[in-house]
Image (tube, grey):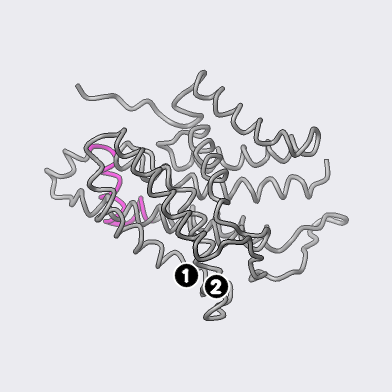
Amino acid sequence: MPPQILIGGLGTGCIYALVGLGFTLVYRGIRMVNFAQGQVFMAGTFLGLFLVQTLGLSAIPLLIAVPVISFAAGWLLERIVFRRLFHSHEVFVVGAIGLGVMIENGIRAAFPEPLPFPKIFGTGVYRFIPGVLFQKTYLWIVVITILLVILLHVLFTHTRRGRALRAVASDAEIAGTMGVSVSGAIGFTFGLSFAVAAIAGILIGPLYFVSPDMGEMVGLKAFSAAVLGGINSVVGTILGGVLLGLVEAIAAFYLSTDYKDLFAFAILMLMLVVRPQGLLGRVVPVKV
């Protein structure tokens, strides 16, 4: 198998992992699944496209501006929309899906046709091994993913805010009695999930034409990655995303690109049947 195939699979897997982290962060905080995460990823891509077209931002400023704006949007939507849906998991899921449809159609109204994303990471190629070439964008994807994982680890383990998030994820009721602002932690979690998904959108944008429906399949596969690795495990979600990307690349090479989606969702179904908690996830006891 050409090494370029594995590199492409690794890059795609990192995108699934980053979008999947949004699912994991929200699930750890409120035990609910935000199915608008794919549309958030798509909106981040178009936000980046807009900022490049209007302000001419380069890669680094764009990777700072887009997640900051997305964080604010996620925090605001949690206050205005999501918080009113927490009383029922079913209502939350339907509301999240509805919000995703609204985001997608709002973007479609502004950008009705697929558009090329500027090559903000350059158009050159790298050659680390003789005969093995890959686009610079893939290196950016892998490096940024690693940096984000490190930053999230530092946030959750070495900061007061991170310890508060972990306390709420463990038991929100007890965390509240210990003086932790549960509502503030949940708002921060939504903002963080939006920011991470938006970064994934910026990273993948230069590789393809971007369109308003690009978030649907990526969101479903990112959810599959989170389930595969363990939706309540950050490390598991990263592992699940990378494994899913590699499996897709291998299936596309040896069989056909028509079958890569089949393998992705077959893995999801198998994991749900055999090990619902995922590879590194844990069973969360239900209080009665």
User: Which numbered marker is on residue 78?
Assistant: none
Residue farthest to the bottom, as pictured: 55
Q: Is residue 157 magenta?
A: yes
Q: Give the crowd class for mark 2: few <14, some 14-19, many >=20 residues within 10 Å.
A: few
Q: Residue at x 67, y 69 (%)?
A: 119
Front position in the image: 96 or 28: 96
> Is residue 190 toward the left or the right of residue 212 in the image?
left
Front position in the image: 259 or 181: 259
Q: Which residue is mark 1?
A: 64
Residue 43: % across, % down:
48, 59
Residue 17: % across, % down:
54, 46
Q: Secondary structure at mark 2?
A: helix
**Residue 117 higher or lower than 163, as above or below:** below
Q: Which residue is mark 2?
A: 60
| Quadrant that contains the C terminus | top left
The overriding secondary structure of the stretch rendered in magenta is helix
